[in-house]
Amino acid sequence: MAEPDEPMMVDGVTCEWAGRWNHITKFLERPGPFTHPDFEASTQSLKFLLETCKILVIGAGGLGCELLKDLALSGFRNIHVVDMDTIDVSNLNRQFLFRPKDVGQPKAKVASDYINSRVPGCCVVPHFKKIQDLDETFYRQFHIVVCGLDSIVARRWMNGMLLSLLVYEDGIINPGSIIPLIDGGTEGFKGNARVILPGMTACIDCTLELYPPQINFPMCTIATMPRLPEHCIEYVRMLLWPKETPFGDGVALDGDDPEHIQWVYQRSLERAAEFNITGVTYRLTQGVVKRIIPAVASTNAVIAAACATEVFKIASSAYVPLNNYMVFNDVDGLYTYTFEAEQKENCSACSQIPLDLHFSPSSKLQEVLDYLTESASLQMKSPAITATVKGKNKTLYLQSVASIEQRTRPNLSKTLKELELTDGQEVAVADVTTPQTMLFRLCFTS
Ligand SMILES: [Zn+2]
């Protein structure tokens, strides 16, 4: 480590120059009113950040670019980034590590190269992959994981992966197996940052009820008393399109087809005029049809900064981390609020308690499937259900493979009794929202 009074030196080996980390050492080497109660000033913290601490960033998009920059400039040098996307021209306004020449290239790779060339000594390792293509051994090597994702399914999967790495000894978590998850999310002018200690504090699935499944308006509003331009567009999309089939029978509405959008736009205008509603535009029509929520660069910057700060606090142990959920909103003025999300006693992901499925023996398998996908606390996407029937492991329903779907589809209309399932037996469910198979206990109601 270079001392502040040493001459400037950038030699490629230590990549240090005098005073390079002065701003960081102020936080790590002197106590203050906000330092952690157990804080002890030490030069070891900086050494740990620079040399040992290994951070995983999930996502190299709007939040990811900001996160990588913030972490690299905060002294983290061992960073991996996972992203499955390539750069689109529409990303360039805010994903500032990318240039027009990079369009079509993998985000993870370009972002890593940029940081590595710009921040001496920093080593970002890219993974142009889906998070699901990496295994436990990969994830276990990190001290902290930061998510900058736009998908709830991916977030839940990551959450499930970190939960699966926990080691329990006599029902107590081995603290060494906990990898903190810092999760950032943005949607237009709104955002949130949260700190999750898997198994110890509220996880993503504990607060699943906070995520609305989709931006859906009540059907009665859309059909009978629209108040917003969006209601008019939804009316055309959901009711008129299937009824009038303007581009032929069975032709689905394509948000990327200008003729389709033009048709919806014209009809929405008519609907809006009928109810004296203003504000229907071509752009809004496309936004509603494609469910586009505009990305706002400054929201990403704020949320990523909050997440990077939490990484710094946890990695250095110098400050008390966020407890544990911060919401940010600058739609109208500026508002932030922090609360402690509570761990849900019967969380399907982190509670360790097998959940009960209450059904009558005469219920059909379809009802079980509907429950798994529609229940606010489960919100599964395409659950595969298996159970041991008469000593044999049997796939009751599986959607992801067409041939198996076809073979198991008749089971959906059979009752649980007809499927020879018994009271109290275990039912295993696999889904894209988690890397682990979930076990449920079937409880017959009379
Ligand atoms: Zn949970």
Image (cartoon, grey):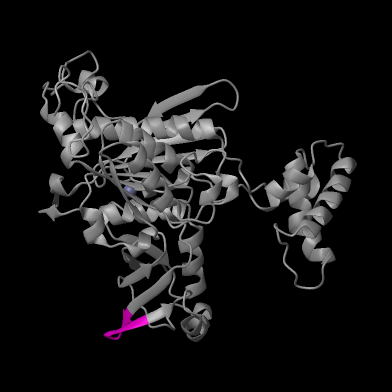
Using the image, determine if residue 430 lies above or below residue 179.
below
Q: Residue at x 51, y 32 (%)?
A: 299
Q: Residue at x 52, y 44 (%)?
A: 99
The stretch drawn in magenta includes residue 90:
no
Quadrant showing the N terminus: top left
Count every numbered label the image shows and give the total: 0
Q: Is residue 283 left or right of residue 321?
A: right
Q: Position of residue 377 (x, y in %)?
A: 43, 52
Q: Nearer the viewer, residue 6 or 304?
A: 6
Q: Position of residue 64 (x, y in %)?
A: 42, 43
What residue range appears in magenta? Answer: 388-394
Using the image, determine if residue 339 lies above or below residue 111.
above
Q: Main secondary structure of the magenta part?
A: strand
Q: Position of residue 119 (x, y in %)?
A: 32, 36
Whether residue 98 can be seen here? yes
Using the image, determine if residue 160 lies above or below residue 16.
below
Q: Position of residue 365 (x, y in %)?
A: 47, 74
Q: Is residue 377 left or right of residue 21?
A: right
Q: Nearer the viewer, residue 399 or 355?
A: 399
Name which quarter of the figure residue 383 lies in: bottom left
Quadrant showing the C terminus: bottom left
Q: Nearer the viewer, residue 337 or 309?
A: 309
